[in-house]
Image (cartoon, grey):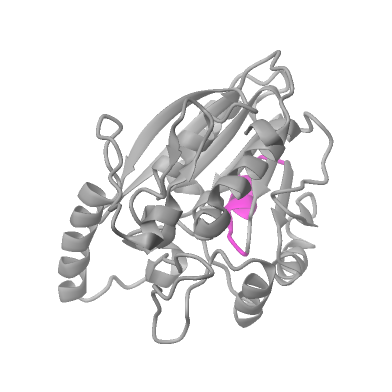
Amino acid sequence: PTPYPPLPAMAVAAALGSAFAAVLLPRPAVPPQVNAGSPTLQRCAARSSAGGSLLFPSALAAAASVIAVRLGSRGWRRRSCRHGRGSSLRASTVDEDFDYGAGKEYWDKRYQKEVGSTYDWLGGYEKFREIIEKATADLPGGPKSARILDLGCGNARMAEEMYDDGFQNITGLDISDVAIEAMRKRNAELRPGIKWVVGDAFNLQFEDGEFDVVIDKSTTDAVSCDTDVLHQNMARMMGEVYRVLREGGTYLVFTAVLDVPRNSLQMPHVSFDVVEKELVLPFASLTSFTAVKRPGKEKIGMEQA
């Protein structure tokens, strides 16, 4: 079993988690706050043309991609990142400088160090199973017939555990060749039905309406780290997810960043019915967004997003 962190670390993390939950992850009724005196945070407030709203990285939440939590098989880890290309604000551990918004080169290098191991950001399949099952419950061929895209799968066991639970039509996509090749080799014999694809979440190579469900587990968090182009990147990713989902299909976002997905799912070039749910953890809160693609949306160009 995975050891818990020492008691002092847990106490500190609990306090930090509570503080972050209060400051960085405001409840829906509380408008996000941004320190206008901070140039970095001013860059984080990217305008959205959807109702004049702002794509806030939740007052450092997008740049911090959030909170200390006990996650997955490696125990204690904080997912954080640099503010953007021009910022010196960064967080690191003893062995690594976190820069989740840096793109393919960063992730290839990271996964090269992790070949032979796996890691599930925000937690594994069991934590999100009920939400996934609800999203697939009404499919004509039954829940397990769902065509599922695991967007930004990395080296997580999410797709493996879903496959073992009976979901047989799963595509795992990641920008990192290293991660995809490692997962392909790892599952070649035990789970031959999973398709492992190298691809870009901003320019998906799939047909329109190809999937019933798209799962985004912390991919939005990583995208949010590149605050210099946050609005543009989220607009591109939302548009691509919307395109590859069938009408009535579901986009599931599991995230520690609140305002970025909340506002992105309301962009004018997509049309979703969205249900937001808080997932309470010992030291923090995560949020799930269940976004169902509405039928009959007229296509709007990216320039209007």
Q: Position of residue 141 (x, y in %)?
A: 73, 22
Q: Please say if 279 is above or below 282.
A: above
Left or right of 128, for residue 160? right
Left or right of 113, for residue 15? left
Quadrant of the rendering where the C terminus is positioned: top right
Quadrant of the rendering where the N terminus is positioned: bottom left
Q: Residue at x 35, y 57 (%)?
A: 60
Foreground pick, 220 / 5: 220
Magenta stretch: includes residue 186: no
Q: Is residue 163 visible?
A: no
Q: Residue at x 47, y 80 (%)?
A: 97
Q: Please say if 179 is above or below 255.
A: below
Q: Residue at x 63, y 56 (%)?
A: 153
Q: Residue at x 51, y 71 (%)?
A: 99
Left or right of 153, for residue 57? left
Foreground pick, 277 / 62: 62
Q: Position of residue 197 (x, y in %)?
A: 79, 56
Q: Is residue 302 visible?
A: yes
Q: Please say if 162 is above or below 101.
A: above
Q: Position of residue 301 (x, y in %)?
A: 73, 30
The boundaries of the magenta stretch are 155-168
